[in-house]
Amino acid sequence: MKPNFSLRLRVFNLNCWGIPYLSKHRADRMKRLGDFLNLQSFDLALLEEVWSEQDFQYLRQKLVPTYPASHYFRSGVIGSGLCVFSKHPIQELNQHVYSLNGYPYMIHHGDWFCGKAVGLLVLHLCGLVLNTYVTHLHAEYNRQKDIYLAHRVAQAWELAQFIHHTSKKADVVLLCGDLNMHPEDLGCCLLKEWTGLRDAYLDTRDFKGSKDGNTMIPQNCYVNQKELEPFSFGIRIDYMLYKAVSGFYISCKTLETTTGHDPHRGNPLSDHEALMATLYVRHSPAPENPRPINGPAETPQLISVLREAWTELGMGMAQARRWSTFTGYVISLGLLLGLVCILVAGGGAKEVAILLWIPSVGLVLGGGTVYLFHTQEAKSLYRAQAELQHVLGKAREAQDLGIEPLPAPLLGQQEGDGAEDQ
Amino acid sequence: MKPNFSLRLRVFNLNCWGIPYLSKHRADRMKRLGDFLNLQSFDLALLEEVWSEQDFQYLRQKLVPTYPASHYFRSGVIGSGLCVFSKHPIQELNQHVYSLNGYPYMIHHGDWFCGKAVGLLVLHLCGLVLNTYVTHLHAEYNRQKDIYLAHRVAQAWELAQFIHHTSKKADVVLLCGDLNMHPEDLGCCLLKEWTGLRDAYLDTRDFKGSKDGNTMIPQNCYVNQKELEPFSFGIRIDYMLYKAVSGFYISCKTLETTTGHDPHRGNPLSDHEALMATLYVRHSPAPENPRPINGPAETPQLISVLREAWTELGMGMAQARRWSTFTGYVISLGLLLGLVCILVAGGGAKEVAILLWIPSVGLVLGGGTVYLFHTQEAKSLYRAQAELQHVLGKAREAQDLGIEPLPAPLLGQQEGDGAEDQ
């Protein structure tokens, strides 16, 4: 490779809002998206919320001359909604489905049924290994009382861990997607601090588009204006993040967003704005991120965000356990009713017995299902928390930063696990 | 590092059969296991089926002077049952929970509730990066009519992919665990061919223990003799597999199994036999596995096993879709009954209406749950199949081996996906 080597990458990202029967003008938007992608001929187009596999197949057929490689990431009941189109051959593929993704009984939110995931594609470009990740995290429905916060933080941690462990031999790492988090949110900071990924919007000197780089803006006619009311200029929840790992340097030459219309000033392509970046990868005299062999450098910022995430997961775990206990009572009540039902039936009052039998079975089965779900939820949160605790322990050892011991009430939940994972 | 560098690793693996209330003499066996591990002072002890976290905590406290580092891998409703004890500090941790793991309604088998997984621990020993994996795959309950075969093959593929993508910078890779597969089984071949892992039992020149290295043998008093009837010398389903990746060479100096008793000729430690190996890692003049940048070399054996796995997953997918269709009919029947119920109630026959209401709600809710489950099952099998298809496509491109096109009836299920993932 020549010392003046330079690789240009043009990347497109869009949350497509492709919910069958519910999203407005879906077919027309998919058609215009296909036309635009063909016209622009990006190196990579990464899409989220392509919920219908028929939409993916339509795009695939339309885009195959320009983007010969493509992949649809399947998971959950509905799918992850993630897909990619690439001008360059995809060398390797993998995906990770998040352990936690909302609650099945919150049917109106629907995230649980989607099987939210992160997809990985490995490309080899001019002898350089590029790991590209595409993801979509759990939606935020109520910022003031966000019942999914612990799940989203756990997802951000799993995403960060997946990237950390699968990109060790990559030269360049690129993550695109809808993180459903504002830039200053805990999960976003956790992800960036643990992986060392940089934000294209904050990095570029040439930005064109919506104010503050926002990707859901009031000017977009498909956006629910009421939900955006507290944010007069919109919110930034879709990202392009990147880093160069070994002997390379990556920078964002230009970044552009759509501004509530499609690029030809027509109806928007989605309720989100698209991100379009031109990235440059160059040789770097020294590694860009000279990280220690153990993983990311344990900076005070990292320690602080790890501790905050640890606490948040602990609160989520306490909540999950409260639900398990409550459903335990519900199951007991159901069993008690069943007993009464048998006694009443023995006494001859069959109509009453039948009437009691319905709630009894309902309480036992319904309570049982919810109990199983929340027990699994607590286990998954505990798993993420134990991994964070391990990292905090290593940081304490490595730098002897004099970190205060972790909060006692939360440590109490660890069932004597404090000394584990040295 | 000196040219005559040599690292000795003593490793222990055991499926502990630690089911609370069901496994015989559990407390006594855990005590004796702890004593034995302390006495032997292995570098690593990898355990499966430690279902109770209390058992892990008991072992942790007992072993902490000899094995200061430990971790319990949490997942699912019950847990993965996996844990590790290490004499050396654990640098990094991660885990992957398999997307498919049996059926929730097969309560008597129970695998679904466990959240079977693979755990990863990264160790740094004398400047060498050692990735150690521990896993436990879905049990085989009926070898003649194995309804879990597609799930186990999908698990083996996810395991192979997890190892492949997370070990790219490791010098040495070690996998221990209960694979619930005989050495010649499809999933076992798929795992070994895709990762390049070698079998300690086949590799060592100094083996002591049960005939053919079997890890479930009729001599063990806890083994269900009826299940082992077709195999007079037992079966080999627990493994130690390894490889050196870059400039190192790994070999198994000695391998030993228990033989139906504990090492002091007392009652066995479990219904499985323990594996105890002494491994040596040395410098290798040339890389042991000079693999192409794309991943494993596409040997005819690999191609053949990938195609076989592709077919097996396709059959699993067809079965899952048949279940989805069947439960669709069940839901329709439930809705029809609900309609009849409303009509009957309108006619005044309330007792009949109540009697009809119960099966109606039951059919809709039960059928709905099973429908969702099998839809998700088909998606997960399809995901694994698409990844296999991608590898087969790359192999076809790379070597132009003249592989016959994939079977038409199965390609038909791909919904026009044949050309995807180039």
Image (cartoon, coloured by chain):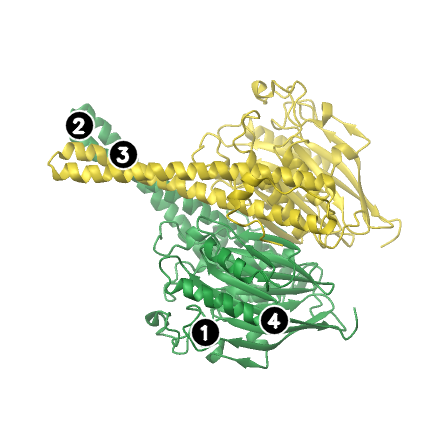
Chain colours: A yellow, B green
In the image: residue A170, left or right of residue B28? right
Q: Which element type, helix, strand or loop, lies under badge 4?
A: strand
Q: Callout 4: 10 Å neighbours few (<14), some, many (20+)?
A: some
Instruction: Find residue A422 and report its horizontal and vertical position in percent.
Output: 63, 54
- The numbered dot on residue A246 is none
Q: Callout 3: 10 Å neighbours few (<14), some, many (20+)?
A: some
- Mark toward the start of the polypeptide (4 vs 2): 4
Mark 1 against mark 4, which lies toward the viewer? 1
Quick check: marks 4 and 2 in contact, CB under 8 Å?
no
Tell me, yes or no, if residue A42 can be seen here.
Answer: no
Q: Could you confirm whether marks 3 and 4 are on the same chain?
A: no
- The numbered dot on residue B350 is 2
Alpha carbon separation for disc pair 3 and 4 = 57 Å
Q: Could you confirm whether marks 4 and 2 are on the same chain?
A: yes
Name the amino acid type tagged 3. Answer: Pro
Q: Which residue is mark 3?
A: A359
